[in-house]
Amino acid sequence: MARLLAIDYGHKRVGLAVTDPLQLIATPLDTIHSQDLFAFVKKYHQQEQLAGIVIGMPRTLLNEATDATPAVVGVVRKLRRELPEVPVHEVDERFTSRMAHQAMLAGGLGQKARRDKALVDRVSATIILQSFLDSRPV
């Protein structure tokens, strides 16, 4: 079975997470520079068949677009254009960074590790992906 790839997109860094082949568990994968995203996804798709891509869509508490929303919409369009065979799913990413910090704290990571923005981005992508997995009908 093919994997799902999650993207927590930021202007500088992109956090990535991936499922196991059975699409049961989300695991942090990597943090890359945002300009390397499309090359990374294409290469990953060649190595590991992707069943879909899940991307966090930034929204405000009032469910309105944020300053980052147009950039993510552009990424979604480009992914759909460059990988038409791979479905792209948009997921509400409100609170994922806060949830990532809480998960890292609960996991016993020290303050220095919790300040590592690349790690926070990977954990956020994992939370986005796991929430997508949990919301699918059984």
Image (spheres, grey):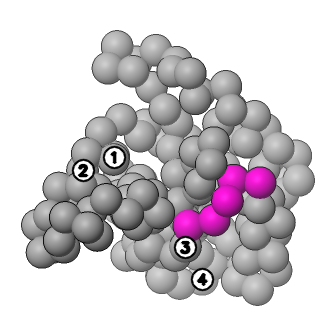
Q: Quadrant of residue 122?
A: bottom left
Per the model, the C-alpha gap separating discs 1 and 3 is 17 Å
Mark 2 lies on a secondary structure that is: helix
Question: The disc labelled 2 sits on which kind of residue?
Answer: Met
Mark nearer the N terminus (4 vs 3): 4
Residue ID at (49%, 32%) = 58
Per the model, the C-alpha gap separating discs 1 and 4 is 27 Å
Mark nearer the N terminus (4 vs 2): 4
Range of the magenta residues?
A: 31-35
Residue ID at (59%, 56%) = 14
Residue 67: percent from left, percent from top: 56, 21
Label disc, if present, on residue 1 of the rendered structure: 4
Per the model, the C-alpha gap separating discs 4 and 2 is 29 Å
Question: The disc labelled 3 sits on which kind of residue?
Answer: Asp
Per the model, the C-alpha gap separating discs 4 and 3 is 21 Å
- Say which quadrant the N terminus sits in: bottom right
Circle 4 packing at 10 Å, graded few (<14), some (14-19), many (20+), is few
Residue ID at (33%, 46%) = 96
Label disc, if present, on residue 96 of the rendered structure: 1
Tag 4 near tag 2, CB within 8 Å? no
The residue indicated by pointer 3 is 30
Between residues 133 and 27, which one lies in front from this camera angle?
A: 27
Residue 42: percent from left, percent from top: 82, 69
Mark nearer the N terminus (1 vs 3): 3
The residue indicated by pointer 2 is 99
